Amino acid sequence: MSHGLNRPSAAPPTSLFSIVMGITGLGLAWRNAHLYGLVPASIAEILLLCGGILFGLFSLYCGYRLIKNRSRTEPVTPVGQLEQLSFAATVSLSLLLLAAAILPYSTQAAKCLWITGAAAQFSLGLATLSLLIRGPHSPAILTPLLFLPLAGNLLGPVSGIPLGFAGASWLMFTAGLISWLTLLVLLFGRLTGFRAIPAEKLPSMAIFITPPALAFAAYLELNHALIDFPGHLFFFAGLFFLLLNFAMIDRFLRIPFSIRCWSFSFPLAALAGAAFDYRAAIGSTLPSAIPIALIVLATVTIAILAVRSLFELYRARKAGMAGLLAPRNSPQD
C-alpha cells in the first residue's frame, strides 16, 4: 500500500502510529542514555510527552475517519488484510511503549496501558498467523511489515516484567521469538527467490532491525539483566541487520517520501536503546562510541523525518489534498 495524494481510504490511517513508535522509542533510548549519565533527563521526557500527545491526536483522527467512513465497504485481498493487521499493530505497540514511558510516574496507568496493548498485540499476532496458515498464498504476501504483529510480541516483557506480568511476558516472548525466526526464513526465501519488494515499500526493510533489538531488551528483563549467549546473539543480530540496511542506502535515498519512511525511525531507536543496555551490562567490551553513534543516527533520522513530514503536510494542505495522510490501494506486488 503506497501513500498517494488524492485517493482516500475507508480504513483509518493507523500507519500514522509508526510516528508515535519512532518518537516514543527515541525517548526511551534517550532515557537509557540519561541513566548512564550521558544526557539530561529532560530530553527523554519531552520526547516521551510528544509521543503521548501524538498518540492522543492520531487516535482522535483515526476515530473520526472510522466514523465518517463507517458505511463504506471495500473488497480486501489477503495482502490488504495482512497490511491492515500490520499497521494496526503499530497502535498496540505504541501502547506498550507508552506503558514503559509512564512506568516511572504511575504504575497503575502503566498497567492499564500494558494490559490493553499486550492483549491487542497478542490478538493481532494470532489473527495474522491464522490468515497466513490458511494458504496457499503468493510469495508477495510476505513482507517485513509482518514483523509488527508477529515479532512485535517481543516488546511485551520490556515493561511487563517490571509490572509483575511474568507469565504473560514469557508467553509473548516465546510467541514473538518463534514468529520472528520463522518469518525471517520465509522472508529471505521470498527476497532471494521472488521478485524484489517495490521501491515504495523498501523502507519496510528497516523493520528487520526491530525484532532482534526487542528480543535483546526483553531477554534482559527476563534474564535478570544478565547477558549470556542469547543476549549477545540478539544484540549483534540487530547490528547485522543495521549494516545490511546500510548496504542498501543507495536505494533508500531514491525512495519518494511517504508515511512509510517512518519505518526507519523505531528500528533505529530500539537498537540505540539496546546498545546502551548492552554497554551497561558488559562494560568496556563494547566501545562507548557505538551506542552514542546509534542514538545520534536515530535522532538525526527522526528529526529529518519530522521536518519532511511537516513540509509535505503543509504542501498537501496548500494544494487542497490530504497528501501524507490518505493512503491509496496499490496492486499486489
Image (cartoon, grey):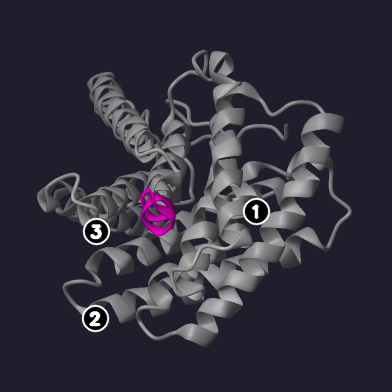
Q: Residues within 10 Å of mark 1 (few under 14, many from 20)?
A: some
| Depicted 211 relative to depicted 144: above or below | below
- Amino acid of disc 2: Thr
Question: Can the viewer see residue 290 in this picture?
Answer: yes
* Res 81 label: 1
User: What is the magenta range?
Assistant: 276-283
Q: Position of residue 36 (x, y in %)?
A: 24, 53
Left or right? Give the position of 314 relative to 221: left
**Residue occupying image coordinates x 20% and y 48%:** 47
- Amino acid of disc 3: Gly
Q: Which residue is at the front of the view, 293 or 157?
A: 293
The chief SS type of the magenta part is helix
Quadrant in the picture for residue 28: bottom left
Q: Which residue is at the front of the view, 61 or 50?
A: 50
Q: Closer to the camera: disc 3 or disc 2?
A: 2
**Element type at mark 2:** helix
Q: How many marks?
A: 3
Mark positioned earlier in the residue sequence (2 or 1): 1
Q: Residues within 10 Å of mark 2 (few under 14, many from 20)?
A: some
The residue singled out by tag 3 in the image is 56
* Res 157 label: none
* Res 107 label: 2
Q: Position of residue 198 (x, y in %)?
A: 66, 25
Mark positioned earlier in the residue sequence (3 or 1): 3
Alpha-carbon span between mark 3 and mark 1: 25 Å
Q: Position of residue 309 (x, y in %)?
A: 30, 29
Quadrant where the N terminus is found in the figure = top right
**Element type at mark 1:** helix
* Cβ atoms under marks 2 and 1 closer than 8 Å: no
**Element type at mark 3:** helix
Question: Can the viewer see residue 204 in this picture?
Answer: no
Q: Position of residue 301 (x, y in %)?
A: 35, 29
